[in-house]
């Protein structure tokens, strides 16, 4: 158990819908990273927040957005969902403002878009 | 764009065999290379390498980085069925939009160890 929690574990929804994935980092960690893992693309970095501020952006679609709240939990919002958004979404946390040490991954949220 | 290529994509061995997993990369302003093991769910950290030629070891696993040739290998000796997993390589490089860094992952090597 990494200490990072994610809810929900599974989510099944229809195309065009909007969902919110939630992540609570390890106690004391200020950085949260979001990743998308699909079979064909592998693990792709989406976005990073550090202490409430956006710090780095990867291959995140405009239909997706994220935020980090004062209590340091983070939410990833996915809207106008398409079949291709079906994937495993991970968040990871570290104590520092850079992945220059190990990231602790949560168990992931499996999103299925029908 | 940063690129990480792992090979082989998949490997099936018998218990007791030794395996070598490869990771090559192209990244500007390289900072570190990390190896992760992913079983059913979340990746778990194995090693972080920043300097060429220095081997990191943890039990039967070891890894080394060659910054001149831009690759790393992960060795597993005396494999066990519990080593069956996807092994991911990731490289830390700068985020183009700012001064921070991000990880770029390879697609992984699926290792299956049969009894």
Image (spheres, coloured by chain):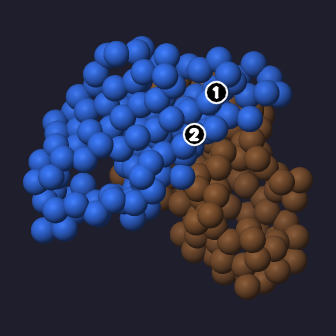
- The residue where tag 1 is placed is B27
Q: Nearer the viewer, residue A77 or A38?
A: A38
Q: Colour of chain A?
A: brown
Image coordinates for residue A54, horizontal then vertical, percent: 77, 34
Q: Mark 2: give few (<14), some (14-19) or many (20+) Cα within 10 Å.
A: many
Q: Nearer the viewer, residue B107 or A105?
A: B107
Q: Tell me, yes or no, whether the two marked residues, 1 and 2, touch with CB atoms within 8 Å.
A: yes
Is residue B12 depicted above or below A48 in this figure? below
First along the sequence among labels 1 and 2: 2
Q: Is residue A26 visible?
A: no
Local SS, label 2 = strand
Q: Is residue B67 visible?
A: yes
Image coordinates for residue B16, horizontal then vertical, percent: 10, 54
Toward which corner of the image does residue B54 lie, by quadrant?
Answer: top left
Toward which corner of the image does residue A77 lie, by quadrant?
Answer: bottom right
Q: Mark 1: give few (<14), some (14-19) or many (20+) Cα within 10 Å.
A: some
- The residue where tag 2 is placed is B4
Q: Nearer the viewer, residue A90 or B67?
A: B67
Q: Which chain is blue?
A: B
Image coordinates for residue B106, horizontal then vertical, percent: 54, 46
């Amino acid at each position: 158990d990494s200490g990072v929690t994610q809810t929900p574990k599974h989510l099944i929804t229809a195309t065009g819908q909007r969902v919110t994935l939630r992540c609570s980092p390890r106690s004391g960690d200020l950085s949260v990273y979001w990743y998308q893992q699909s079979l064909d693309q592998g693990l792709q970095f989406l976005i990073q927040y550090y202490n409430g501020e956006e710090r780095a952006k990867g291959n995140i679609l405009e239909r997706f957005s994220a935020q980090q709240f004062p209590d340091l939990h983070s939410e990833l919002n996915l809207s106008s969902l398409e079949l291709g958004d079906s994937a495993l979404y991970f968040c990871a946390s570290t104590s520092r403002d850079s992945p220059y040490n190990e990231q602790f991954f949560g168990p992931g949220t499996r999103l299925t878009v029908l | 764009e940063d690129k990480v290529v792992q090979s082989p994509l998949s490997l099936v061995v018998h218990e007791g065999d030794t395996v070598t997993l490869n990771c090559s990369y192209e990244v500007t302003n390289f900072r570190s290379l990390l190896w992760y093991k992913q079983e059913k769910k979340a990746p778990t950290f194995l090693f972080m390498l920043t300097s060429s030629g220095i081997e990191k070891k943890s039990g039967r696993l070891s890894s080394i980085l060659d910054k001149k040739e831009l690759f790393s290998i992960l060795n597993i000796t005396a494999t066990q069925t519990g080593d069956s997993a996807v092994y991911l390589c990731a490289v830390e490089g700068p985020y183009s939009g700012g001064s921070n860094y991000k990880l770029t992952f390879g697609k992984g090597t699926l290792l299956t160890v049969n009894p």
